[in-house]
Image (tube, rainbow, N blue to C red):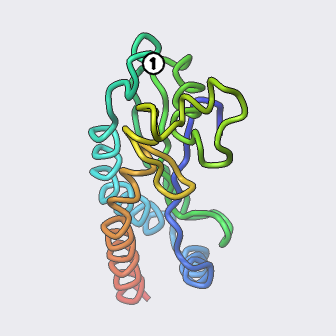
Amino acid sequence: MTQDELVLDIKIPPAEIAKIQGMLKVLEPKLRRSLSRDLNKSLKPVAAQIVADFPSAPLSGLASRWGRISAAVRVDVNGPPNKALARFIIKADPPEFARLLSITERAGSRSEGLTPQGRNLISNSKGGLQERKPLVGAGGRFAFKSYFDQRNDVSRKVIDALATFIDKFNRDS
């Protein structure tokens, strides 16, 4: 992961992933690519929605440095069981925006701010980020919030793609 990327993982129980990866090892590459394509195809709309939900500058002082994001789905069907089967990769555009995105996305998730400027950025009472764009758990405000809003849909899509894969596998065996 580079500095200008934010990663959102889709978690499936390791036992399930291990079972599927065991199947993948005995399969021909064509069937593995099929699972990869199905997961990628079903998750692309979620990535597009994360980009669509991304706001313009949440505070006027950030407007001159605020940028855009792009999102992509990365599927790794051959990874180890403790790794995510699919990930959303969020990139900042321009790359200089990555640091500001990281700061504003997570501001207040680990502390209340270490400097007076940090406390003002986060502040709930002075029109700061916490008031305008509340933090979602320990995740974030923008990309994470959009992902969390779609999490059930993502899980359903992944489970459907895996069920389809298992059906294909059983038919071919």
Mark 1 is surrounded, within 10 Å at the Cα level, by few (under 14), some (14 to 19) or many (20 or more) other residues, namely: few
Tell me if residue 72 can be seen.
no
Between 28 and 3, the one lying in front of the other is 3
User: Seen from this angle, which residue lies furthest top?
Assistant: 64
The image quadrant of residue 143 is top left
The image quadrant of residue 100 is top right
**Taking 73 as reference, is 101 left or right?**
right
In this figure, which residue is indicated by the disc labeled 1? 62
Between 123 and 139, the one lying in front of the other is 123
Which quadrant is home to the N terminus? top right
Percent position of residue 20, x then y: 54, 79
Percent position of residue 155, x then y: 38, 71
Between 119 and 105, the one lying in front of the other is 119
Above-or-below relation of 9 to 59: below
Q: Amino acid at mark 1?
A: Leu
- At 36% from the left and 50% from the top, the residue drawn is 146
Above-or-below relation of 144 to 84: above
Percent position of residue 103, x then y: 59, 32
